[in-house]
Image: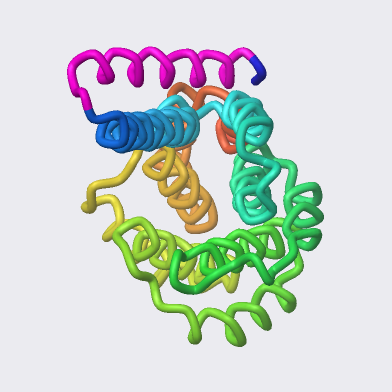
């Protein structure tokens, strides 16, 4: 990270010197340099975050996402708010890696004073924690949190709206309301979703097929998740299911 700071300082210095030759006014050159450097920094940060999220959503590699998140923590983790947001990201990676207890512990260690309804961080925190409870079989805790917190939190963007739809469909599955859950999951397949979300839905639908005795359909869906899920926990679970059902 020290190397990155040195590069940043050197680039800033070069831009400042170059502009000083082109613009005789040093103050103006300094303002332009600051603006260019800040815009560049924001663009690089956005690209880095997009690439990090893609490790989960398209490459289906939660371990690589967790490693990238820790690298990001070394860059921005000194800021308590950013460190908190990265812990929420970490919990998502752990959930998709099948480490539900670790994910729950990570979330429960978060200082919620740094979370906000405005930027969606409180919403994501609660969605992830509810998911942990469901995965650990703690349905009463999940339901209590769902009924207490979610009505107070409004999704403000497409990603959050998709998250609440997924949570609702999964909740119906956990409550053994299979027909309703199946309808909701199939509706979600018609939306623009990432590869990871699509595979997650297929895994849930395979569980519903298995419950209904539609083993041929279940095997087909488990096979899809197994072949395309890379290092996701559900891909490993699908491989185990295929061994049992075939």
Is residue 11 shown in magenta?
yes
Q: Position of residue 43 (x, y in %)?
A: 34, 33
Q: Main secondary structure of the magenta part?
A: helix
Q: Position of residue 66 (x, y in %)?
A: 64, 32
> Looking at the figure, which quarter contains the N terminus?
top right
Give the left or right position of residue 222, taking residue 149 as reference.
Answer: left
Against 126, residue 146 (above or below) is below
Q: Judge whether residue 243 can be spotted in this image.
A: no
The stretch of residues the image draws in magenta is 3-24
> Front-most of 32 and 136?
32
Task: Using the rendered view, name the quadrant where residue 198 is placed.
Answer: top left
Give the left or right position of residue 188, taking residue 96 as reference.
Answer: left
Give the left or right position of residue 171, taking residue 188 as reference.
Answer: right
The residue depicted at 67 percent of the width and 54 percent of the height is 84
Q: How is the image coloured?
A: rainbow
Task: Using the rendered view, name the quadrant where residue 32 is placed.
Answer: top left
Against 3, residue 59 (above or below) is below
> Front-most of 203 and 209?
203
> Front-most of 33 and 3?
33
Extreme-left residue of the structure:
22
The residue depicted at 61 percent of the width and 49 percent of the height is 82
Give the left or right position of residue 146, taking residue 111 as reference.
Answer: left
Is residue 51 shown in magenta?
no
The residue depicted at 49 percent of the width and 51 percent of the height is 204
The residue depicted at 65 percent of the width and 43 percent of the height is 90
Q: Position of residue 174 (x, y in %)?
A: 59, 67
Q: Position of residue 117 (x, y in %)?
A: 49, 73
> Front-most of 244 and 159?
159
Q: Judge whether residue 111 can be spotted in this image.
A: yes
């Amino acid at each position: 990270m020290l190397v990155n700071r040195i590069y940043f300082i050197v680039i800033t210095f070069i831009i400042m010197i170059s502009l000083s030759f082109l613009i005789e006014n040093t103050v103006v050159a300094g303002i332009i340099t600051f603006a260019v450097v800040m815009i560049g920094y924001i663009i690089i940060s956005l690209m880095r975050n997009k690439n990090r999220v893609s490790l989960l959503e398209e490459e289906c590699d939660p371990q690589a996402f967790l490693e990238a998140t820790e690298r990001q923590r070394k860059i921005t983790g000194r800021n308590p708010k950013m460190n908190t947001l990265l812990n929420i990201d970490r919990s998502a990676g752990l959930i998709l890696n099948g480490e539900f207890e670790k994910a729950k512990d990570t979330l429960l260690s978060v200082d919620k004073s740094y979370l906000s309804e405005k930027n969606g961080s409180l919403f994501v925190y609660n969605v992830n924690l509810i998911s942990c409870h469901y995965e650990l079989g703690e349905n009463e805790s999940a339901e209590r949190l769902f009924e207490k917190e979610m009505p107070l939190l409004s999704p403000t963007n497409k990603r959050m709206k998709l998250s609440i739809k997924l949570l609702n469909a999964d909740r119906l599955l956990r409550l053994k309301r299979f027909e309703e859950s199946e309808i909701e999951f199939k509706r979600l397949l018609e939306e623009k979703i990432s590869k990871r979300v699509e595979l997650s839905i297929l895994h849930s639908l395979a569980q519903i097929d298995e419950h209904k005795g539609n083993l041929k359909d279940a095997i087909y869906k488990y096979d899809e998740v197994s072949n395309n899920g890379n290092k996701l926990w559900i891909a490993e679970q699908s491989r185990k299911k295929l061994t049992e059902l075939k």
